[in-house]
Amino acid sequence: MTTPTPENQDQFDQFEDEDTEQQLGATASGRKRLFSKELRCMMYGFGDDQNPYTESVDFLEDLVIEFITETTHRAMEVGRPGRVQVEDIIFLVRKDPRKYARVKDLLTMNEELKKARKAFDEVKYVD
């Protein structure tokens, strides 16, 4: 192993920084990876290798973050300024049948879960 000299000290520091970022799950832009575990599972579920390449997962996560960010910004412009409401998201996806159907399914399931929790809590308090 070579001893760092003033000329190549920066080179060694660069590698230490990269190792630290990889350990923390940070991106090249300094952002922490939020969905990598879930995306790996989804990729495997859709036919990828059980352990997909990290670069593929990172790329897919960048696309997901970009989609969420753009959709959120658009939703903030549609309804009340600076606020995002469910109706704004529905308005944005209304022309895409697959997205619209998925949003409706998720909202319906959310309501059913709320009702089930409420019924469970009522039974719990009665006993």
Image (cartoon, rainbow, N blue to C red):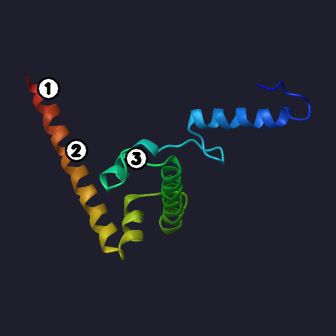
Side of 34 relative to 120 (left or right):
right
Q: Position of residue 116 (x, y in %)?
A: 16, 42
> Which residue is depicted at the point 22% across and 52% down?
109
Camera-nearest residue between 127 and 43: 43
**The quadrant where residue 99 appears:** bottom left
Please, what secondary structure does the residue beneath circle 2 have? Answer: helix
> Which residue is depicted at the point 46% across and 57% down?
84
Rendered position, 62 above or below 27:
below
Residue type of the residue flagged with mark 2: Lys
Q: Nearer the viewer, mark 1 or mark 3?
A: 3
Camera-nearest residue between 52 and 35: 52
Q: Position of residue 30 (x, y in %)?
A: 65, 44
> Which residue is depicted at the point 36% across and 54% down?
48
Q: Nearer the viewer, mark 2 or mark 1?
A: 2
First in sequence, mark 1 or 3: give its number. Answer: 3
First in sequence, mark 2 or 3: give its number. Answer: 3
Q: Quadrant of the N terminus?
A: top right
Q: Position of residue 60 (x, y in %)?
A: 48, 56
Residue type of the residue flagged with mark 1: Tyr
Q: Position of residue 85 (x, y in %)?
A: 42, 58
Q: Quadrant of the C terminus?
A: top left
Camera-nearest residue between 14 and 28: 14
Q: According to the image, label 3 marks what residue?
A: 40
Please, what secondary structure does the residue beneath circle 3 have? Answer: helix
Q: Which mark is residue 125?
A: 1
Please, what secondary structure does the residue beneath circle 1 have? Answer: helix
Side of 104 relative to 69 (left or right):
left
Other residues around mark 2 within 10 Å, as few (<14) / some (14–19) / many (≥20): few
Q: According to the image, label 2 marks what residue?
A: 114
Side of 38 relative to 7 (left or right):
left
